[in-house]
Amino acid sequence: MSDPIDHNKVVVLTGAGISAESGLPTFRDMGGLWEQYEITEVASPQAWEANPQLVLDFYNERRTKAVAALPNAAHQALAELESRYEVVVITQNVDDLHERGGSTNVIHVHGELVKARSTADASLLYEMGGKEIQLGDLCEQGAQLRPHIVWFGEAIHNFDVAARHVSSAGKVLVVGTSLSVYPAAGLLTKAQASAEKLIVSPDLESEPVAFHWIKGTAVEHVPQIVNRWLEE
Ligand code: OAD
């Protein structure tokens, strides 16, 4: 049984594309991160086992760049929606640009760069801000700290909570994701038939079923969509 639809609820599902105009590279576009790095060498438990320094270097650089970046007009517009709707942002991004853009209800399904966690106890989280994680940085139990990031082969965070939000939303807006990484990409299928469903992206391999594709960038289109919804 799905939850009843709530027409005052907007769920926004975002990916790397929403932060592209803040200067942070996406993963799969030309010049994207996965062209410069082998995923398996920096973003997997095996990589951490084989070469933790390389993994820390990769995420320390990501953290430094993310902390220096600023939220753009798309992040900021989403925060404005909160004046009229219950808004839940479900993001695959590990930056904190939604929070700094003013959104107050953000679910990170792939983790967060500004946090470190214990390799001995996943419930022990530490705020890093922009600080690097080094080999030898230990949790209170004496175990090495690692990035609070979901690596390939690891379970994503908060999936069930995220899926319930999508299934009760009157409006679902997808921004800047290639929808190529599951199970996060599968969250779209939880949207109800009668929900308004939009996807903003300059490119898409295939249009997800029942979503209306608005072709262009996040900064070009998200503020307009938000303004229209605020006027409804
Ligand atoms: P991708 O790099 O796979 O896809 C980015 C999408 O954003 C593409 O569809 C682009 O066309 C689109 N895009 C580029 N510039 C844009 C702009 N200015 N405005 C709007 N859209 C734009 O990134 P994700 O889908 O987020 O996971 O990748 C999903 C996951 O794969 C990431 O969370 C990461 C990665 O491996 C982990 O690290 C666990």
Image: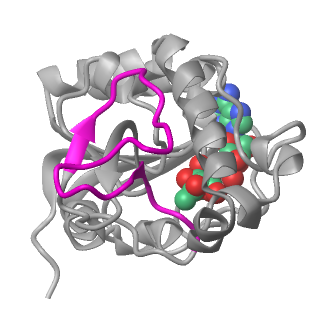
Residue located at (68% from left, 59% from top): 51
Is 137 placed above or below 229 here? Answer: below
Is 84 placed above or below 180 here? Answer: above
Residue 228 seen in the figure: no
Residue located at (43% from left, 74% from top): 189
Is 56 placed above or below 46 here? Answer: above
Q: Could you tell whether 202 is left or right of 197 in the image?
A: right
Q: Could you tell whether 82 is left or right of 49 in the image?
A: left
Q: Which region is colored magenta?
A: 125-152
Q: Nearer the viewer, residue 114 or 219?
A: 114
The quadrant in which residue 2 appears is bottom left
Q: Quadrant of the C terminus?
A: top left
Residue located at (18% from left, 63% from top): 168
Q: Position of residue 144 (x, y in %)?
A: 38, 54
Residue 152 seen in the figure: yes
Q: Could you tell whether 204 is left or right of 83 in the image?
A: right
Q: Could you tell whether 170 is left or right of 119 in the image?
A: left
Q: Quadrant of the N terminus?
A: bottom left
Residue located at (24% from left, 53% from top): 170
Q: What colouring does the structure picture have? A: one colour
Q: Position of residue 176 (x, y in %)?
A: 60, 41
Is 220 placed above or below 124 here? Answer: above
Q: Position of residue 164 (x, y in %)?
A: 20, 69
* Residue 195 drawn in magenta: no
